[in-house]
Structures are given as C-alpha cells and as structure tokens.
Amino acid sequence: MSMNRPKEIRTDHAPAPVGPYSQAIEANGMVFCSGQIALDPMTGQMVGETPAAQADKLMDNVRAVLEAAGLGMSNVVKTTIFLVDMKAFAEVNAVYEKKMNGHKPARSTVAVAALPKGALVEVECLAVR
C-alpha cells in the first residue's frame, strides 16, 4: 500500500494559521485539522468573551476547514477540546453538541495552562472520507 503525498487544505473562511503550520493536511483519505480558536477569519481578532461564545465561533472555523476539504462534521472521527478552565466544560459541551448536530465522534477534553492569543478554548479534529 503506497501513501499518497500529503495535501494542504486551505480556506479564507477560517483564520490563517498563527504559526508555521497548515489549517489541515489530507493524507490517505484522512484530514488532520489543526486546532481552531475563535478568530474572525477576516480581521484576525478574537470573537467572544466567554468559553461558550468562543466555542460557537471556533466550531464555525472547524466547519469551514472541513468544507474546504469537501467534508462536513459527520466525517469527523476524533476531536480534542482544550480548555483553559475545566469549569467551562458544560457550557462548551453544550455548544459543541449543537454544532455537531447529533454526530458523536470519539473525543478527549483536556485542561491546559494557556492557549494562543489568549483563547479560552481550542478544538482540533481528525476526519475521514
């Protein structure tokens, strides 16, 4: 079995990377999406003062990256949620559940000391064709 050359996935409908990485990479039918935070793709500014408000925006960013790959939320098989404060779990979970529209991929949620640009929450995912 030969591996296809990895392909960069890029869209202007999600924030440009804030470092030396891609929004997503596709290899062998799997799309590895970098973590998304609640940045407005047009202004690069953080959207939302609460973890729930940020989760709402960042999940739209996740969807935009997936759509650029020709996929949707139903193609997601694994997500990781990073929270600055685990007390925000319930409010972020409620937004996540709504944005996933009933789809329930495998998931991990971890507390972290800090996130880029002062974000309160970040989500990364793996999707398949």
Image (cartoon, rainbow, N blue to C red):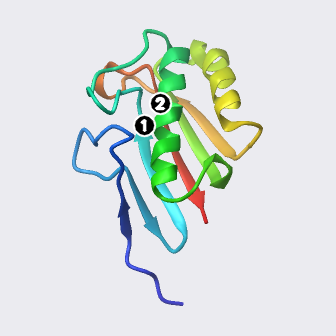
Picture residue at 47% right of the left edge, 56% below the top: 32
Q: Is residue 106 above or below residue 87?
A: below
Q: Is residue 9 left or right of residue 127?
A: left
- Residue 109: name its quadrant: top right
For label 1, the SS is: strand
Residue 115, x across and y down, in percent: 36, 27
State the residue position of label 1: 36
Residue 22, x across and y down, in percent: 32, 53
Q: Is residue 8 above or below residue 79?
A: below
> What quarter of the picture does the C terminus occupy?
bottom right
Residue 57, x across and y down, in percent: 48, 26
Picture residue at 34% right of the left edge, 20% below the top: 46
Picture residue at 43% right of the left edge, 41% below the top: 35
Distance from the alpha carbon under mark 2 to that under mark 1: 6 Å
Mark 2 Cα-neighbour bin, 10 Å: few <14, some 14–19, many ≥20 = many
Looking at marks 2 and 1 on the same chain, the residue that comes earlier in the sequence is marked by 1
- Residue 42: name its quadrant: top left
State the residue lying farthest toward the top.
Answer: 49
Mark 1 Cα-neighbour bin, 10 Å: few <14, some 14–19, many ≥20 = many
State the residue lying farthest toward the left.
Answer: 20
For label 2, the SS is: helix
Type of the residue with mark 1: Gln
> What quarter of the picture does the N terminus occupy?
bottom right
Q: Is residue 5 left or right of residue 53?
A: left
Numbered label attached to residue 94: none
Type of the residue with mark 2: Leu
Residue 21, x across and y down, in percent: 28, 51
Numbered label attached to residue 58: 2
- Residue 9: name its quadrant: bottom left
State the residue lying farthest toward the right.
Answer: 102
Picture residue at 69% right of the left edge, 28% below the top: 98
Circles 2 and 1, Cβ within 8 Å, touching? The answer is yes
